[in-house]
Image: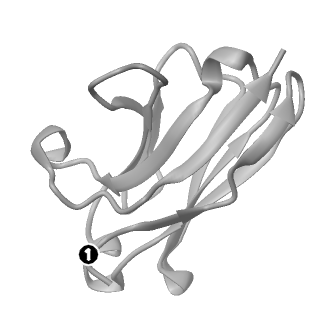
């Protein structure tokens, strides 16, 4: 698959949890640092949220640090985002892709919608 396929989103209340998955070609995923991104409601650009390298080094933006955990399972060609203590401002469409050149990337797939009610 050329485009990532994200899943696991849904409608939740503040304080609840979701676990997102994203799968794509193993030929790409297995050799790249992978990232999670969010397109917030009413915004024009996706925001970087978290990344994980091929040897499991992780990085997070401050707004999700301590609440979200990124992981990868290369045998399943999949990365994950465990999201705990969700807040309404976490709402948006979540995507994954390699981090290299992500801002100009054309192939994002449909993403997965996360809606957190207050």
Classify residue 20 as left or right of residue 32.
right
The residue depicted at 43 percent of the width and 50 percent of the height is 95
The residue depicted at 36 percent of the width and 20 percent of the height is 43
SS at circle 1: helix
The image quadrant of residue 85 is top right
Quarter of the figure with the N terminus:
bottom left
User: Residue 33, percent across and down?
Assistant: 31, 55
Q: Is residue 77 above or below residue 107?
A: below
Tell me, what colour scheme is on the image? one colour
Residue 91 seen by the camera:
yes
The residue depicted at 41 percent of the width and 53 percent of the height is 96
Q: Is residue 114 above or below residue 53?
A: above
Classify residue 50 as left or right of residue 71.
left
Residue 65 seen by the camera:
no
The residue wearing badge 1 is: 28
Classify residue 98 as left or right of residue 96.
left
The image quadrant of residue 47 is top left
**Front-most of residues 47 and 32:** 47
Classify residue 91 as left or right of residue 83.
left
**Front-most of residues 73 and 23:** 23
Quarter of the figure with the C terminus:
top right
**Front-most of residues 14 and 56:** 14
How many labels sit on residues?
Answer: 1
Q: Is residue 109 above or below residue 44?
A: below
Crowdedness of circle 1 by 10 Å Cα count: few (<14), some, many (20+)?
some
User: Residue 21, percent across and down?
Assistant: 60, 62
**Front-most of residues 112 and 31:** 112
User: Residue 89, percent across and down?
Assistant: 63, 16
Which residue is the extreme one toward the front? 42
Q: Is residue 57 above or below residue 106?
A: above
User: Residue 62, percent across and down?
Assistant: 52, 14
């Amino acid at each position: 698959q050329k485009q990532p396929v994200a899943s696991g989103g849904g409608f939740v209340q503040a304080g609840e949890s979701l676990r997102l998955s994203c799968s794509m070609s193993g030929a790409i995923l297995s050799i790249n640092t992978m990232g999670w991104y969010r397109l917030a409601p009413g915004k024009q650009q996706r925001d970087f949220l978290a990344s994980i390298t091929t040897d499991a080094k992780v990085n997070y933006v401050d707004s999700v640090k301590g609440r979200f955990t990124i992981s990868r399972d290369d045998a399943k060609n999949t990365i994950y985002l465990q999201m705990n203590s969700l807040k309404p401002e976490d709402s948006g469409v979540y995507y994954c892709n390699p981090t290299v050149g992500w801002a100009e990337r054309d192939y994002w797939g449909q993403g997965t919608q996360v809606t957190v009610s207050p």
